[in-house]
Image (tube, rainbow, N blue to C red):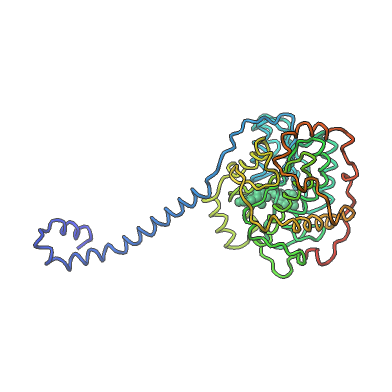
Amino acid sequence: MSTTKHLKHLKNLKIDEVDENLEEFKETVDDFYPAFVGTTIVSVIILGIFLTRLYIRWSVHCNSKVNMRGKTVIITGGNTGLGKSTATDLAKRGARVVLGCRDKVKGEAVARSIRKKVNNQNVTCLKLDLANQRSIRDFVTEFNEKERELSVLINNAAYMGPKSSTSEGIERCFGVNYLGHFYLTWLLQDKLRKSAPSRIINVTSDCYAQGKLDFDDLAMTKSYTMYGAYCRSKLAMLIFTQECHRHFFSGIIFSYAVHPGACSTDLLRNWPGLTGNILRAAARVLFKTPEQGAQTIVHCAIDDKIRGHSGKLFANCRQIKVQDFVRDKELGKKLWNVSLHLCGLDHEIIEDPEPDVAAASASEVPDGATAAAREAEKPSEVKPSKLSAPAPQAQPAAQAGE
Ligand SMILES: NC(=O)c1ccc[n+]([C@@H]2O[C@H](COP(=O)([O-])OP(=O)(O)OC[C@H]3O[C@@H](n4cnc5c(N)ncnc54)[C@H](OP(=O)(O)O)[C@@H]3O)[C@@H](O)[C@H]2O)c1
């Protein structure tokens, strides 16, 4: 008898007939059991996926109506993913947006499409390859020739993938995601000072907590994993944000780190094999859209209420706590000096620096920011020597990449 017939039959039984039909009842339950278990498992999986998706994709929208007319913004890696979404949002608010892209043709096409989409003609692209220090210098030279001011520098571009190295022989994740941005920021610091109050935004990730900075093995010769190298670069970006605050805050340059959340972008494009395919498929289903991910970057670029939180990490448009080990000042100082060295700026290394705001609490200064910014705009405040960085020297083998 089919399962449905069994059921109909059982339904019509009188109570005193039940005992006699117990065997039949058991048989029916046995028939149903696998289907019941299967349905339950599938339902739990679907519910799990749904709840995980809800959790990962939960994002706060930046509701600020701030207009960016008259402000110039640089976004590295602005041709795709979060960079492109951030560029579109800021251009919509009237900003002059410069996309720093390693592929100029791709970048120009994206700039064109943003111009058309938001009806702002001031979106352009300059070539920038963060894996090549000469390209970074050329970018800064061209930018300085073309643009009078720089209100917001968004260090967004990133690489994640198999082991490789930059033109200077630095492990690529560290070199592109962190060191290239360090050098770019260093070269643009005077422009940022002149344009004060201005901002540096470093896009990092909450995976920084899994990163390990071993200064004796920056090339990761002992062990390399794609994720490990990526986490290390994001840890460096977070420490760098705190150091930017210490070094640049007195110039009324605010620094923020942003964790955008897990977003469906091209970041996993270099992850090889089946794992890569699975990760990319999962990302498409579960992760935030680039527009959602860009919200906190936009928030940190425009919101005036966060001035008292310079040097801090943001996620979902809110400041979040960082783990204690990140706040180690010695670690920050060491990273800063090693970075100067790797960029051929050894003459800038100060063993015991008196950082601009060593003891200043971020919340003490911002209200005076506008007045101080006016001061900063005076030509005498600008230190042109720092703009002209010398060509990088050959790297010591221990710190070089492959
Ligand atoms: N997606 C996430 O889930 C997630 C999570 C946390 C943090 N983040 C961070 O968010 C930021 C944006 O990433 P995304 O998700 O938007 O990734 P994406 O779509 O892969 O965009 C990365 C951008 O970086 C550029 N880039 C790579 N190497 C470069 C180089 N050598 N010089 C200049 N530009 C280079 C890429 O240019 P090409 O197109 O020419 O390669 C691309 O424009 C990154 O800092 C990333 O670490 C992302």
- Picture quadrant where residue 72 is located: top right
**Horizontal and vertical percent for residue 255?**
72, 44
Residue plotted at (26% across, 66% down)? 30
Picture residue at 23% right of the left edge, 60% below the top = 3
- Between residue 159 and residue 242, name the one nearer to us: 242
User: Image height check: is 248 above or below 49?
Assistant: above
Provide residue 336's location: percent of width, then percent of height. Answer: 79, 54
Could you tell me which residue is drawn at 76 percent across and 32 percent down?
A: 370
The residue lying toward the viewer, choosing from 306 and 101, is 306
Q: Quadrant of the N terminus?
A: bottom left
Q: Where, quadrant-wise, is the C terminus in this rendering?
A: bottom right
Query: How many marks are shown on the rendered structure?
Result: 0
User: In the figure, is residue 52 to the left or right of 130?
Assistant: left
Residue 356 appears left or right of 160? right
Residue 309 left/right relative to 21:
right
**Residue 138 placed where, x, y %?**
84, 45
Q: Position of residue 256 (x, y in %)?
A: 69, 45
Q: Nearer the viewer, residue 398 or 21?
A: 398
Q: Viewer-proximal residue, 320 or 147?
A: 320
| Residue 266 visible in image | no
Residue at image position (72%, 50%) is: 242
Q: Is residue 362 visible from the viewing direction of this image?
A: yes
